[in-house]
Image: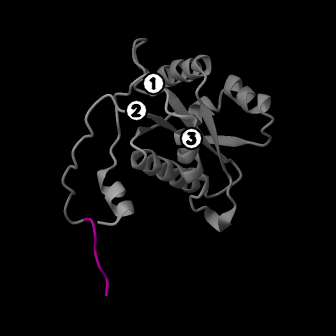
Amino acid sequence: MNEVLKAIKERRSIRKFKSEMPSKEEIEKVVEAGLYAPSGSNKQGVISLVITNKELREKFVVANREIGGYSSDKDPFYGAPVIIVVLAKKESNNRQYDGALVMGNMMLAAHSLGLGSIWINRAREEFEREDFKQILKDLQIEGEWEGVGHCAIGYMDCELPGIPPRKENRVYYID
């Protein structure tokens, strides 16, 4: 079977990660895959923040937990040591679509490298907060940005979940 199609069929959301940090090379390959995602009119209006700093990661955990209404002992990123935050220019009409394509590419790349991944929401709400906008200012990122999602990655601390059957009646051909 074609390797791309195989990865698409086998990739699953992972909800238990080892604390071990993936190599810089592995992280860079995942991020690079996001850079090659299609974008409306090829504007490439999506950026990624690669969070490996433990203190900053904890800031995201606390905020995401608050926004999601989770208990204080829950890690909404399931212990993944790397959080890649995807943001898109607010002025772009395609921001959510373009960001989703970046997320999909990164999750497939992670799987192809033997890493687990999961899409975690609430990035939009985080980057509506002034302290998170300040992160962008500190990085000298100008403009208005909207959080699309978090791609949490790391080494799986579980078995790869099986492939659930696909629901029927989801494709209609019109000849």
The residue indicated by pointer 2 is 155
Mark 1 crowdedness (10 Å alpha carbons): few <14, some 14-19, many ≥20 = few
Q: Earlier in the sequence, mark 3 or mark 2?
A: 3
Query: What's drawn in magenta, residue-wise?
Result: 170-175
Q: Residue at x 18, y 54 (%)?
A: 165
Percent of width and height locating residue 160: 27, 40
Residue 155 is one of the magenta-drawn residues: no
Query: Where's the C terminus, which quadrant?
Result: bottom left
Callout 3 amino acid: Glu
Query: Where's the N terminus, which quadrant?
Result: bottom left
Whether residue 100 sits left or right of residue 1 in the image: it is: right
Quadrant location of residue 136? top right
Mark 1 near mark 2, Cβ–Cβ under 8 Å?
Answer: yes
Percent of width and height locating residue 98: 58, 56
Mark 3 near mark 1, Cβ–Cβ under 8 Å?
Answer: no
The residue indicated by pointer 3 is 25
User: How far apart are labels 1 and 2 at the CA level?
Assistant: 7 Å
